[in-house]
Amino acid sequence: LDMASPSVIVVQPQLTVSNAPSALWQTGLMDCCSDCGVCLCGTCCTFCLECKVASDMNECCCCGGSVAMRTLYRTRYGIPGSICSDFCIILWCPVCSLCQIKRDINKRKKLGIF
């Protein structure tokens, strides 16, 4: 029997989003002053802001502040990052993360790309 040598995978396939240009977040994680209303809502009524973010993305209200939601949003708009970085941001700065997503949604709506 002639055995063929096993093929070695050198490059893993990558998920690409064809209709979303690669970009960065519209605002920084700690850029609260760019939209004080969002930050005030996030600080005083985090659950309300979580529900609003989830609603904007047509997801379940309980998912608004989750790692899955941040990863979904980042992937949808080609924003660089990883699940690990999303987890760490949600763990250490949950309200800032939620506010960043909502500010990004608002800016993308104004630009007509949401």
Image: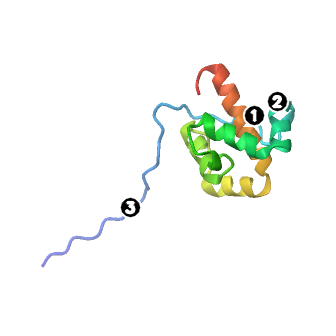
> How many numbered circles are shown?
3
Secondary-structure class at tag 2 = loop
Q: Which residue is mark 1?
A: 27
Circle 2/circle 1 CB separation < 8 Å = yes
Q: Which residue is at 74% across, 41% downward?
A: 48
Which of discs 1 and 3 lies nearer the camera? The answer is 1
Disc 2 crowd rating (10 Å Cα; few below 14, some 14-19, many 20+) is some
Query: Seen in the image, is 78 located left or right of residue 39?
Result: left
Secondary-structure class at tag 3 = loop
Does residue 74 lie above or below 114 as drawn?
below
Amino acid type at image mark 3: Ile
Does residue 40 lie above or below 7 as drawn?
above
Q: Which residue is mark 2?
A: 35
Q: Position of residue 75 (x, y in %)?
A: 56, 43
Q: Which residue is at 26% across, 71% downward?
A: 5
Q: Earlier in the sequence, mark 1 or mark 3?
A: 3
Query: Seen in the image, is 37 located left or right of residue 68?
Result: right
Q: Position of residue 99 (x, y in %)?
A: 76, 40
Amino acid type at image mark 1: Thr
Which of discs 2 and 1 lies nearer the camera? The answer is 2
Regarding residue 26, the answer to whether it shows in the image is no
- Which of the pair 61/35 is nearer the observer? 61
Q: Which residue is mark 3?
A: 9
Query: Seen in the image, is 91 located left or right of residue 70?
Result: right
Q: Which residue is at 47% across, 46% downward?
A: 15
- Between the residue at mark 1 and the residue at mark 3, the CA separation in whole angstroms equals 38 Å
User: Where is the N terminus found, in terms of image quarters?
Assistant: bottom left
Q: Earlier in the sequence, mark 2 or mark 1?
A: 1
Secondary-structure class at tag 1 = loop
Amino acid type at image mark 2: Asp
Q: Quadrant of residue 45?
A: top right
